[in-house]
Image (cartoon, rainbow, N blue to C red):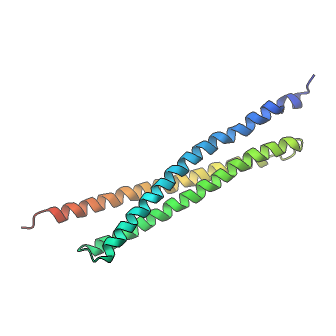
Amino acid sequence: MLTTTAATHGPHAILTAMLAPAFFLTATAALLASANARLARVVDRLRILIADWRHDAPDSGERAEQIRRHRQRSHLVLRACRLLYGALASFVGTSLALALDALVGFRLGAVPTATAVIGVLFLLAASFAMWREVSLAVHSFDLELDHSLQSKRPQP
């Protein structure tokens, strides 16, 4: 008959525990794909703004301000991507720590939990960076829209 420790930490329990970080990995990968798509869109828009600015568009002052805002957005998305990659690494580390812990007779103590908590903290920080970027994107869009509407109004 299995002892309580062996039954509690049997191969199926260990594999189940190793799968839990996979859910975090999946969520993080989805967020990372979204963040990378946002970064690509910001970079594309920035290239268009720079090209317009170089060709002395009539509103080059406004273009320079848009470039500044989009540059800030790109740095926020880059920060989020770095944090998300850190989260991915932490969740992979959690799975490996769980496997290693089982191999060494459950002597790692809080290491697997600590790596999971670090991953969750990376996710939290990345969420705040993306929240700031989305807020800046909407603010930037509002300013660009206001500028476009003002330039289209008939002058008395």
Left or right of residue 153: residue 91: right
Of the pair 142 and 78, the residue shown nearer to us: 78
Q: Name which quarter of the figure residue 56 lies in.
A: bottom left
Residue 97 picture location, percent across and down: 78, 47
| Residue at x-position 41% and y-position 55% | 135
Decide: is 23 above or below 154: above
Residue 44 picture location, percent across and down: 41, 62
| Residue at x-position 89% and y-position 44% | 104
Q: Is residue 95 visible?
A: yes
Left or right of residue 71: residue 140: left
Q: Is residue 118 visible?
A: no
| Residue at x-position 42% and y-position 58% | 41
| Residue at x-position 87% and y-position 42% | 103
Residue 113 picture location, percent across and down: 74, 45
Residue 110 picture location, percent across and down: 79, 47
Residue farthest right in this picture: 1
The quarter in which the N terminus is drawn is top right
